[in-house]
Amino acid sequence: MINKADAIVIGSGGLGAATAYYLSQPKRLSVALIDKHDIGSQTSPRAAGMVSCARKSDLMISLIKDACRKIEAFTEETGQPLDWVHSGSLKIARRPQDAEVIKADFERGRRMGLDVERISPERASRLNPYLEPTGVVAAMRIGDDMYFDPAQVAIGYARAAAARGAILLPNTEVLAVNISVGKVTGVTTAKGPIEGRFVVDAAGAWTRQVAEAIGIRVPLVPTRHQLIVTEPLDGAQANLPMVRIMDAAVYVRPCQGGLLWGVFEEAPRFLDMQSLGANFDIKNTPLDIEVLRSAAAEVKDQLPILQTAQVREFRGGIPTMTADGHHILGPAPGVRRFLLRQRLQCSRAFNLADGGRGARSMDR
């Protein structure tokens, strides 16, 4: 156990581990990466691992393009394995208003240099035979999109950070962030105190608990998300383009010889991490497969395979949502040297998505 570090990162998911890695570059900061569970073991490895480049703003498109480059260069940069496939994707509209969204996405994407193309429903079906053209009014191919194995990202960044000198502290609960004269001085853990000049709150579903303990309100909500990985299927090649059904908020991608698919729920289950108890682990997330069965029925004309494919894995995680759809990143107000690093998931429960019913997001 150490007693001092320049920077203390709380949470070893994808964002926390990446933060520790970049802070621990040679001759920079000494870094401690702390997690109350095993390193990289909570929501990050349970994600879908899909990268969608056609976003609603020029800034987000630029950021996602940069993320794609990071994924492609991950192994070369970190020395750690990362399996990824540049498959492209198909964005599918079943309603006229969603076709208008596709038109705007196409124009924005082309202006931003994306490989985008408006195609017929029949061509979309030829590109991914699991997709039927029935009921499809518009489709767009996004050639830049890709998917990756999310379980490899957090652990890869953490191992690479350790190779640069960062100290990994798994199974170490942070009991308090220590403050003196309005600025961070370190943390107190269940194994003892650690002095630190900076503290980064990247605790995922527990972000609010960490911040609120020092009087900082973080406007995000931990929200259950569920997905299914099917048994192997004939024709489920790794390079099949991903599919997103806009109004249903259903997504599908190849995965280990089968398909991985999920849905952004119209009425998702929000979770109070405090009430779940100090020993809660993401693997104990309460799941409801009927949500997925209902989603499969909703898109049965376009993706009939979801009705019959056998389930190999049914899993869930607890990503976070914000009401305005913006990411939470940077210094927190009121306490110097306390920073937030939190990716968000948008839900169709909020009025955020492009063309969703009530609104659903396909940004995952």
Image (spheres, grey):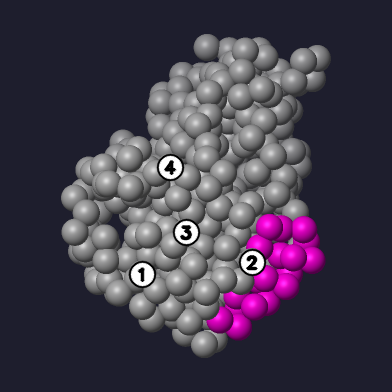
Residue that numbered label 2 is attached to: 117
Circle 1: element type: loop
Q: Residues within 10 Å of mark 2 (few under 14, many from 20)?
A: some
Q: Nearer the viewer, residue 126 or 283?
A: 126
What is the x, y in percent for residue 278? Answer: 34, 39
Q: Nearer the viewer, residue 195 or 112?
A: 112
Using the numbered discs, state the Cα–Cα distance from disc 4 to disc 2 in whole angstroms. Answer: 21 Å
Residue that numbered label 1 is attached to: 132
The answer to whether mark 3 and mark 4 are in CB contact below 8 A is: no
Q: Say whether residue 29 is visible.
A: yes
Q: Give me the residue at 46% from left, 26% from top.
A: 39
Who comes first in sequence, dot 1 or dot 3? 3
What is the x, y in percent for residue 30? Answer: 71, 18
Q: Give me the residue at 53% from left, 23% from top.
A: 81
Residue that numbered label 3 is attached to: 127
Question: Hey, what amino acid is under mark 3?
Answer: Leu
Above-or-below relation of 146 to 171: below
Residue that numbered label 4 is attached to: 238
Q: Give me the residue at 52% from left, 87% from top.
A: 96
Q: Magenta span has 241? A: no
Left or right of 194 in this view: 284: left
- Tell me the magenta residue range: 99-116
Left or right of 293 in this view: 221: right
What is the x, y in percent for residue 7? Answer: 69, 27
Question: Hey, what amino acid is under mark 2?
Answer: Glu
